[in-house]
Image (cartoon, helix red, strand yellow):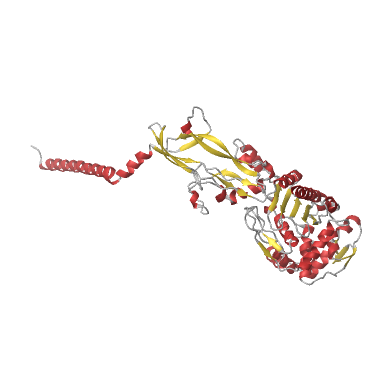
């Protein structure tokens, strides 16, 4: 006979099993309700998406053009084949074997006709990284999110004018079968091409500059008097096409590890001691501050000795000779160091720095490509805060001739010289031909600027330091030119930087150009010939066009 405890145990177990089965059925029923009713639309859409694919149609990128319409950066059409992935996406492949017309799509490959003759200003294209995929450019949200195969501008004009140049991709909605094969096109939205950017670059001048600077580490920039950039070159350079063409990873890696830094934009990204090309600024400061006037005469003895330390003039150092009595124009023409030591002391470092700031030598010029850095104009306060050192008279002397801690970029030098050439209009350099000039008028005496310009004109004539330009006016039908040489010591045993800057014609400048050859030697002998080639080409070309 069954015991009472055993019967109770069996009864409890039976009810437990019944309850578990009921609970399982309730859970199953709830899941069916969720799938069929609550999430029915979601799973229906998911099923639809498994047979519908959205293919992004690439949009052609706008061209970058020279002043005369020459193509500096363009795109060529490339046929690609659409291949759908198991994950529901797609890829564009170069393998066209057996492809039907419906499987083909037109893609675009960027091409830079000038190769390594204009890379730092143009920039290049690169595929978006993981962080950029799906993101919208806040400057042009209408372009939509970036997809994984998007190419965007990196550095230069390609980056700064990304919104103008990039097009809006189109889209094709395609129905596919279970194997992922195309059945039919359900809809299509055509891509919107990007717009062209026309620059102020003189194609022939740019080519001439690149050819002349080939093998010379340095930079050249040329503008008109309102800041429109006519030529822009940094050497060593690179060919931006290598970022577009496949199989160049070793070449790119080699350039990235090159000690000469071919990707470094020396025109706007490098700062260098300016040497004597800084002297016109010191001359303006001395005149504007009333430290000297047009009648000021200095008697050069070749050397100034302070506390048993000698500060010499280059003419005395190299030839053992003195200049004798010189006025401001003669001092600029002959680049007389002792003259500028003297007037620099009379003006003082703070006021020299003030006028350097007025002419934009310690601020960004605002050029319309990324990567610009700011120059350094030292002051006693800066030296105390930065180096915890006092300022000495020797620092003032060094500053007066563009040495010591003075460090500026070639674009800054060219912009300040342009302001002198144009009667005090400090203009923002720019590539965009149709962007209105942005200039501000400096509060500086035209008479003082004319006196400085006279000294720079004399530098280019017989007896000045720029001997490569002595016959320029004769060769170019009376075009008068103003210039300044510069030789900036890098260290006691290093080869100096060679500088040359000029503008012409003096009365109504059409071109302002600056040449820097990094650790190249004497400005007159190394940078001067390059500058002469630039000037010769420009005015020969200008005559032929008119």
Q: Is residue 541 above or below residue 311?
A: above
* Residue located 10% across and 42% down the image: 4
Residue placed furthest toward the left: 1
Q: Quadrant location of the N terminus?
A: top left
* Residue 544 x/y as whole percent: 76, 47
- Can residue 271 be seen here? The reply is no
Number of marks drawn: 0
Quick check: 535 left or right of 247? right
Q: Horizontal and vertical percent for residue 423?
A: 74, 64
Q: Is residue 456 visible?
A: yes
**Which of these two is toward me, 480 or 386?**
480
Q: Residue furthest top?
A: 98
Give percent across and percent down for residue 197: 61, 49
Residue lying farthest bottom? 290
Q: Which of the 4 image quarters holds residue 280?
A: bottom right
Residue displayed at 70% across by 50% down: 232
From the viewer's side, name the closer residue of 505 and 264: 505
Residue 400, x across and y down, in percent: 78, 63
Q: Depth check: 128 or 511 in front?
A: 511
- Left or right: 492 with respect to 191? right
Q: Is residue 430 above or below residue 354?
A: above
Q: Is residue 188 left or right of residue 473?
A: left
Where on the picture, by quarter, is residue 211? top right
């Amino acid at each position: 006979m069954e015991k009472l405890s055993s019967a109770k145990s069996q009864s409890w177990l039976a009810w437990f099993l019944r309850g578990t089965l009921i609970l399982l059925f309730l859970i199953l029923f709830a899941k069916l309700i969720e799938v069929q009713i609550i999430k029915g639309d979601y799973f229906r859409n998911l099923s639809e998406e498994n047979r519908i694919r959205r293919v992004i149609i690439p949009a052609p990128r706008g061209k970058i053009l020279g002043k005369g319409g020459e193509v500096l950066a363009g795109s060529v059409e490339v046929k690609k084949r659409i291949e759908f992935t198991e994950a529901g996406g797609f890829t564009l492949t170069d393998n066209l074997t057996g492809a039907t017309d419906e499987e083909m799509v037109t893609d675009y490959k960027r091409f830079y006709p000038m190769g390594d003759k204009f890379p730092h200003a143009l920039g290049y294209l690169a595929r978006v990284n993981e962080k950029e995929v799906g993101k919208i450019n806040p400057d042009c949200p209408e372009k939509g999110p970036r997809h994984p195969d998007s190419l965007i501008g990196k550095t230069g004009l390609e980056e700064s004018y990304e919104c103008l140049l990039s097009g809006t991709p189109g889209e094709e909605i395609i129905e596919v079968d279970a194997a992922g094969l195309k059945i039919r096109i359900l809809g299509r939205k055509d891509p919107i091409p990007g717009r062209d950017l026309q620059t102020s670059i003189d194609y022939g001048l740019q080519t001439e500059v690149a050819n002349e600077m080939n093998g010379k580490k340095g930079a050249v920039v040329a503008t008109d008097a309102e800041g429109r950039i006519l030529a822009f070159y940094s050497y060593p350079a690179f060919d931006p096409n290598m970022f577009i063409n496949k199989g160049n990873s070793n070449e790119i890696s080699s350039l990235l590890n090159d000690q000469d830094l071919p990707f470094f934009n020396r025109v706007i990204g490098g700062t260098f001691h300016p040497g004597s090309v800084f002297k016109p600024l010191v001359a303006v400061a001395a005149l504007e501050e009333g430290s000297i006037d047009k009648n000021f005469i200095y008697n050069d003895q070749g050397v100034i000795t302070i506390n048993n330390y000698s500060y010499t003039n280059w003419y005395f150092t190299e030839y053992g000779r003195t200049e004798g009595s010189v006025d401001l124009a003669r001092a600029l023409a002959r680049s007389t160091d002792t003259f500028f030591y003297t007037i620099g002391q009379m003006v003082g470092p703070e006021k020299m720095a003030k006028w350097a700031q007025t002419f934009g030598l310690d601020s960004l010029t605002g050029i319309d490509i990324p990567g610009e850095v700011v120059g350094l104009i030292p002051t006693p306060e800066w030296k105390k805060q930065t180096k915890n050192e006092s300022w000495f008279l020797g620092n003032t002397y060094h500053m007066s001739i563009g040495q010591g801690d003075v460090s500026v970029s070639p674009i800054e030098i060219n912009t300040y010289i342009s302001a002198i050439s144009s009667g005090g209009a400090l203009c923002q350099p720019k590539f965009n031909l149709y962007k209105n000039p942005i200039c501000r008028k400096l509060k500086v005496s035209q008479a003082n600027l004319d006196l400085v310009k006279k000294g720079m004109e004399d530098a280019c004539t017989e007896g000045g330091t720029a001997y490569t330009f002595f016959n320029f006016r004769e060769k170019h039908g009376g075009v008068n030119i103003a210039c300044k040489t510069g030789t900036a010591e890098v260290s006691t045993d290093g080869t100096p930087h060679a500088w040359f800057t000029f503008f012409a014609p003096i009365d109504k400048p059409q071109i302002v150009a600056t040449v820097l050859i990094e650790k190249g030697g004497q400005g007159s002998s190394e940078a001067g010939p390059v500058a002469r080639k630039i000037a010769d080409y420009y005015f020969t070309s200008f005559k032929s066009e008119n």
